[in-house]
Each structure stands twice: as structure tokens, then as C-alpha cells.
Image: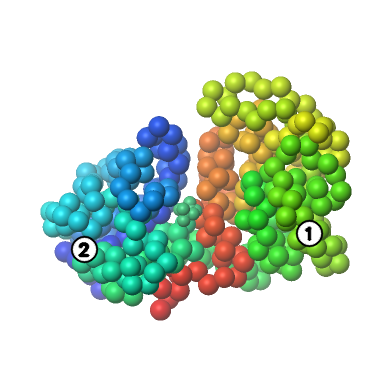
Amino acid sequence: IDELLADGVSGKRVFVRADLNVPLADGTITDDGRIRAVLPTVKALADAGAKVVVASHLGRPKGAPDPAFSLLPAAERLGELLGAPVAFAQDTVGPAAHDAVDGLQPGQVAVIENLRFNPGETSKDDTERGEFADRLAALADVYVGDGFGAVHRGHASVYDLPARLPHYAGYLIATEVGVLKKLTEDVKRPYVVALGGAKVSDKLAVIDQLLGKADRLLIGGGMAYTFLKAKGYEVGISLLQEDQVPVVTEYMERAEKQGVELLLPVDVVVSRTFPDLKTKAPTENTVVDADKIPADQEGLDIGPKTRELYASKLADAETVFWNGPMGVFEHPDYAEGTKAVAQALVDTNGFTVVGGGDSAAAVRTLGFDENAFGHISTGGGASLEYLEGKTLPGLAALED
Ligand code: 3PG
């Protein structure tokens, strides 16, 4: 983007593909981290006199307009953060979008409606995606990719559109890639990775890669129960992906052979019922050893012994990557495990990276100071796929 700014963008229409896919509760943004993350790029372009057209997806609407997934709240928040009015177009490539863009003066910003309201955005059909990319290209003279959270998607606005316009990487993408490179090239050791979240299937590929790279892997969250099952424990009614048990067993064997410390919870907080995340009503729960989960209960957080163990394993880390909460952190009864890992990252002197929408949101909603972490990535799937060593369509399209 510095190159673009140096060439001059005054009066040019610059399409910024951001990732404004923020969590919403009843239409209110609960974490605006992703909007703040794209501000440097939007501001720099506006200050340089560009006519800035910001676009993003939000959620997973079914290729048609759906008010529940409107980008309007994100556009309003962007305006507040910029301290300047932001025009909002109620369609993506239709007359409203053209009117909004045509109405921009140099230095002004418009946001167009959710890209996924059009089936062409996510289509697997190259022609359909290409047609949508053509219509998006008609809105701009230049493309800036800055939606790091979406670079692992081969979608029209991420992958096809840059090929149709002069294209540049924004500041956020440059920062994110710079940080993730540190984790893949010449990483400082001990390199400790904490992985949580609900589904082990989402993390298998990254675990596969990390077994050859990390010194320690700390497992928590819903995915831990598939590991505990693979270890031969009964997990009651905890989240379990039975079909993944053989893969996980193989990973555990490989970890041992390769001298990678793979740590599982030694105790967990269990309950008969899943907590109410809306009312956050107090729940009945107990702490049990990981091999004594009652048949009618489910594990919802790592227990106190595990928190201490994981904190001790993070204490001397030179590099840490953390993706995925350790428990149902949205409810106070099950937030302690996630808090303990976040605190351990704050306490270590090593370079810490928090990756993933949920863990990033957890850090902020649990009241941690974001500046206490080395880097909080805006990309969940994107940062994992980067670490998996995959080619990310949105980055490949910009390098091209
Ligand atoms: C994310 O939240 O990880 C990104 O915004 C991508 O969203 P998606 O998983 O719906 O493509």
C-alpha cells in the first residue's frame, strides 16, 4: 500500500476488501477488533484523497439479502472510529452501490452491503464468481486487500477481483503475514502452542504441521475430549468426535516419538447441563479428574490443576501461539481456563500470538489489555491455514 500511496491515489476509487465479520448480539457489535484493525489502511487512503470503498462479508447468509447479516452496524462503527461520516449502500453492486461511490468526494469513505448477499461471492463456479468480480471491479480503479481473516477463502472479492484491478496489500495483511512468518521461519524456542475450541476436526491439519515444529502442545476446549477418549478415558456427554479418535491416537503416538510434549487436561469442570449463555445464570458444576468424568455430565472447562500445569508450561516459552478458548468462556462459571491461559501469555516474556476470532474476542471480553500480547490476529481459519503451510488464495492473488 505504501507503493500505491507513493504513486498517489487522490481522486481514485480504491476498493478495500476488509474483514468486518464482527460478532453481533441483537444487532450490537460485541467486539469491534476487526474494524479497528483495518483503520490504518482506510485512514491512510482517505488522508491521501482516495475515494474509499470498503467491502466485507458478515456471517454466512445464503447468497441473498438478509437483514440479520447487514453490514450497517459495522459501517456505523467504522464511521465512529474514523470520526467521519461513512456512506452506506444498501446493495453490493447495484444502483445503491454505484450511487454511493459516485457520490464520494476525495477523502470520503463508503461501505457497500454484505458481499455474501450475492451468490457470486462464494460460488464454486468460476464463471459465476468472475461475473460478480466484474461487477465489483466496476466500482473501483484500484484494489487493496486487507481482510486477513478471509484470505483463506477463494471468494470473488478475495481471489478473483484483485486479478481485475491493480492490486496491493493493506497494512493489516502486511502485519499479520509478518507475524505469522515469525512462527514458521526460525521460531524462537521453546515454542509452545495452546489449542482449544470446539471441534478437533478444524485443528487436525494444524496439529499435523505443529508436531514437527512446536516443542509443546497444550490441548483444551471441546476438542480435548476426543483426545481424552483416545487416551482411553470415558468422557460422559462431553463434545466428542468419535470418528477422529484414530487420527488423534496417531498424533499422540507421533508426538511421543518426535519428543513433542502433548499435554491434555488432567482435571475438568463438569456439569449436567450446558449453561445459558444469554442469562449467564449460575450453574451447578464440579471439578473432577479427567479420567473420572461422570457418564451423565459434560466437560465445559479445564480444571484448576490443568490451569496451573498449562501456565507452568507457558512460563518459559520464547514463542507462543494460542488458538481457541479452553472452555465455554462466554459463561463466567467456565471462563477460568481461558483466563488462565490468557494470563500466562501476558506473564511470559516470550513473543505471544493470539489467533482466531474466538480467542481474540475472549481476550478482549474477559478484560485483558490487548497491548499485553505480542499480536492478536484477526484471522481464525486464516492464521491456522497459514501455519498449516497452505497457499492462501487471498495472499496468492496479491503476490501475483
Ligand atoms: C472468519 O470469521 O474466520 C472470517 O471472517 C471468515 O469467515 P467464514 O469462515 O464465514 O468464511
**Relative to 396, is 55 above or below?**
above
Residue 220: x percent and y percent? Answer: 71, 46
Q: How many marks?
A: 2
Residue 32: x percent and y percent? Answer: 42, 42
Q: Which labelled disc corresponds to residue 246?
A: 1
Q: Amino acid at mark 1?
A: Pro
Q: Quadrant of residue 142?
A: bottom left
Closer-to-camera residue (108/234): 234
- The residue at the point 86 percent across, 35 percent down is 292
Say left or right for 364 vs 187: left
- The residue at the point 36 percent across, 61 percent down is 121
Q: Amino acid at mark 2?
A: Leu
Q: Quadrant of residue 270?
A: top right
Q: How is the image coloured?
A: rainbow
Residue 261: x percent and y percent? Answer: 81, 57
Q: Quadrant of the N terminus?
A: bottom left
Mark 2, other Cα within 10 Å: few <14 / some 14–19 / many ≥20: many
Residue 120: x percent and y percent? Answer: 33, 62
